[in-house]
Image: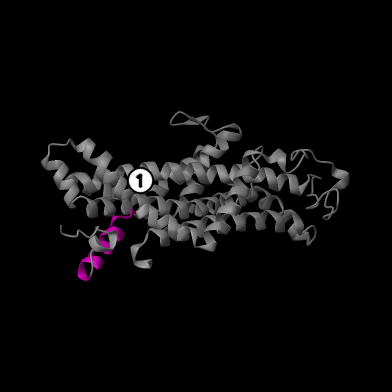
């Protein structure tokens, strides 16, 4: 009878050069999203920015959790009071509670940033996808159109565009009066003049993805262009556009604040940090009640910084060269 030695895992495990190749294959099989999330979890700036953004989103969605004061209720006799136990951030010239207005101001600012970002992402990605995938005359027309809009300064475009439609009741079927009408005015101008940057990035990503083997294999198997775009091109080309849109969100909040500060963007009855900074100009000229400027400016700076930090963290996580 011959002895048969039981086979163990160690006996079948590859050794030498084969072991290295197996490890490389396992590492290569990990998805880009999994690697990006692993990198984000180790980045402290991601958690700091995510926590700040969460606070601002909750503040915008549920301001009643932070204050029970009416931001539009003012008492002239208590105007220009400094921070106190009753009014944490003091009061403005009209006797409004600055803390309540700062909390409610997050709603319009965050809403403008989110809607403008989604609008530019959808429009820019769609046009960039068409230009990059089809090429030819479609690519030329969309790229030249993007160059025209890209050459127009965003702030200048906002001033001219909003001033021209301020008295109109609706534009493209979108109402321009009332709270949401004022918000949609700013969102509309940001989308119309902000999509070229996303389009350029999406076009470049599609051009890089289109020659890949899995796209050519799907085309050879008879897949329709729509199916190729949905299942192969779009999922592998969206990451750069999403990263840049995250960074742009903070920039759009800053643009809204600048337009409101100039008296062109949001106006009464809308409350935003830019509107509050604009209203504090009268007090600043007299050198009194500086708190009416400091607190909304602080919240605005933190919100913009948080979104930019998040965008930088996501960009580093999705960039293979950083790992």
Q: Which residue is mark 1?
A: 124
Residue 149 visible in the displayed image: no
Lateral position of residue 220 relative to residue 286, left or right: left
Identity of the residue drawn at 51% across and 48% down: 159
Q: Which of 32 and 192 lies nearest the eye of the viewer?
A: 32
Identity of the residue drawn at 32% across and 42% down: 126
Inspect the magenta stretch and tell me whether residue 21 lies in it: yes
Residue 2 x %, y %: 15, 59
> Quick one: which residue is furthest to the right in this view?
77
> Quick one: which residue is furthest to the front in this view?
1
Give the residues drawn in magenta, as a range: 16-31
Helix, strand or loop under label 1: helix
Mark 1 residue crowding within 10 angstroms, few (<14) / some (14–19) / many (20+): many
Q: Which of 292 and 70 lies nearest the eye of the viewer?
A: 70
Identity of the residue drawn at 52% across and 39% down: 185
Q: Magenta-highlighted stretch: main secondary structure? A: helix
Task: Work out which quarter of the rendered image holds the C terminus and state it.
Answer: bottom left
Vertical comparison of 33 with 182: above or below: below
Inspect the magenta stretch and tell me whether residue 154 lies in it: no
Vertical comparison of 15 with 306: above or below: below
Vertical comparison of 2 with 225: above or below: below
Residue 66 visible in the displayed image: yes
Q: Which of 77 and 6 lies nearest the eye of the viewer?
A: 6
Task: Work out which quarter of the rendered image holds the N terminus and state it.
Answer: bottom left
Lateral position of residue 282 relative to residue 45, left or right: right
Residue 295 x %, y %: 71, 56
Identity of the residue drawn at 23% across and 68% down: 15
Residue 105 x %, y %: 66, 45
Corner quadrant of residue 74: top right
């Amino acid at each position: 009878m011959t002895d048969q030695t039981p086979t163990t895992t160690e006996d079948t495990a590859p050794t030498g050069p084969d072991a290295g190749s197996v490890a490389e294959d396992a590492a290569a099989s990990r998805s880009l999203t999994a690697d990006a999330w692993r990198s984000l979890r180790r980045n402290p700036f991601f958690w700091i920015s995510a926590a700040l953004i969460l606070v601002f989103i909750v503040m915008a969605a549920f301001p009643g959790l932070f204050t029970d004061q009416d931001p539009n209720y003012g008492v002239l006799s208590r105007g220009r009071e400094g921070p106190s136990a009753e009014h944490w951030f003091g009061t403005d010239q009209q006797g409004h509670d600055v803390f309540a207005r700062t909390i409610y101001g997050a709603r319009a600012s965050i809403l403008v940033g989110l809607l403008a970002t989604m609008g530019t992402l959808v429009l820019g990605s769609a046009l960039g996808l068409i230009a990059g995938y089809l090429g030819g005359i479609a690519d030329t027309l969309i790229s030249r159109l993007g160059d025209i809009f890209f050459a127009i300064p965003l702030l200048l475009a906002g001033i001219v565009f909003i001033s021209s439609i301020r008295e109109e009741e609706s534009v493209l079927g979108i109402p321009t009066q009332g709270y949401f009408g004022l918000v949609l005015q700013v969102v509309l101008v940001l989308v119309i003049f902000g999509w070229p940057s996303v389009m350029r990035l999406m076009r470049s990503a599609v051009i890089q993805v289109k020659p890949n083997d899995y796209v050519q294999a799907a085309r050879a198997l008879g897949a329709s262009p729509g199916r190729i775009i949905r299942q192969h091109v779009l999922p592998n080309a969206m990451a750069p556009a999403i990263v840049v849109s995250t960074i742009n969100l903070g920039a759009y909040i800053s643009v809204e604040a600048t337009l409101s500060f100039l008296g062109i963007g949001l106006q009464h009855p809308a409350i935003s940090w830019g509107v509050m900074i604009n209203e504090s100009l009268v007090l600043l000229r007299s050198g009194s009640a500086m708190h009416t400027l400091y607190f909304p400016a602080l919240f605005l700076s933190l919100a913009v910084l948080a979104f930019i930090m998040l965008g930088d963290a996501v960009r580093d996580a999705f960039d293979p060269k950083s790992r």
